[in-house]
Image (spheres, rainbow, N blue to C red):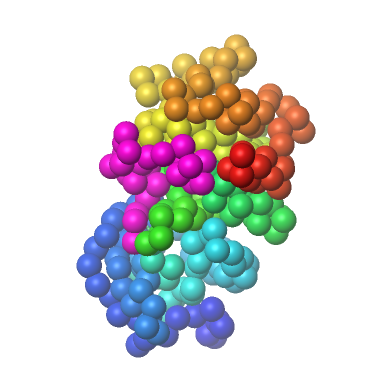
Amino acid sequence: GRYQWEVDPEELILGQEIGSGQFGLVLEGSWRDLKVAVKMVREECMSDDEFKEEARIMMRLSHSKLVQLYGVCTQHSPICLVFEYMENGCLTDYLRERKGSLSQDILLGMCLDVSEGMAYLEMSNFIHRDLAARNCLVSKNNEVKVSDFGMTRFVLDDQYTSSQCSKFPVKWSAPEVIRYCKFSTKSDVWSFGVLMWEVYNEGRLPYENRTNAEVVDSLNAGLRLLKPRLAPDSVHLLMEWCWKEKPDDRPTFGLLFHELASLSDA
Ligand code: ADP
């Protein structure tokens, strides 16, 4: 049968390649007069059937600070995921390209945008599982939006999904995720603290010269990432709050959004 979130391949026009990721190529395209980004999903990279069920839930998630999934095209292989087009690409590259020229207002605004998108996911009881600057995208109007929410659950590559393995995002992961794969909104909050650190370091990689094993040891010893030079104390305090050992001691995204908004008014 045909799903209601199915995109008709006749209506989808594919253009140039704009990137490649975990699941395969990303192309620009258009669909019903909208500019879109199309992820071509290689079959061996994704558990399709589970994803098709989940796509329905993901399409219901709709917020100005989330990259919208418009639909999926499952008629042919590879299946395609059709997303809102984000002219300014991924946040990590955006930060690196503008290093030295981003004002305090802009850096804070980026964190505020992400916290707003995440507060919506929190309210929707949806766990992101892989929040990081590389999984946020920047619009034509320089708004930052959260992307790739929930997608790691469909990755078939073990190297990515087991915390013991090389591609697992240990440097963004809360201790309970590293130890027992216990994902929650509070583990997303930990990752958000690392994302704020990335923003205030203009796209630098966290723990640049350290292996995953070394990072785990230093977390276990109670150590944390250092205060970025550009971060005011008030912002650094929020990061440290996100990195509390116990998930319950970390703030909610609702609260983080509120706190960041009050800093941006000040
Ligand atoms: P994956 O989730 O499969 O790992 P990514 O989301 O990292 O793939 O996409 C790879 C690259 O494609 C990104 O770094 C970005 O440059 C580009 N891209 C992905 N989604 C979009 C989008 N919605 N709009 C514009 N560019 C995008």
Q: Position of residue 105 (x, y in %)?
A: 48, 42
Residue 85 shows up from this direction: yes
Q: Looking at the image, which is closer to me, 213 or 88?
A: 88
Residue 66 sits above or below residue 79 on the image: above
Which residues are drawn in magenta? 87-110
Residue 78 in the image: state x and y as whole percent.
35, 69
Report the front residue among 171 and 96.
96
- With 145 as the anchor, is 174 left or right in this view? right
Would you place residue 172 above or below residue 117 in this image? above
**What residue is shown at x 34% (from left), y 61% (from top)?**
87
Question: Which quarter of the figure is the N terminus placed in?
Answer: bottom right
Give the residue furthest to the top.
221
Q: Residue at x 33, y 77 (%)?
A: 30
Left or right: where does residue 213 sit relative to residue 43? right
In the image, farthest residue toward the bottom:
10
Magenta run includes residue 94: yes
Identify the residue at the far left of this view.
Answer: 16
Q: How many marks?
A: 0
Where on the picture, by quarter, is residue 262? top right
Location of the C terminus (image quadrant): top right
Q: Is residue 205 magenta?
A: no
Tell me if residue 177 can be seen.
Answer: no
Percent coordinates x, y for residue 233 in the rendering: 58, 24
* Picture quadrant of residue 37: bottom left
Residue 220: percent from left, percent from top:
60, 16
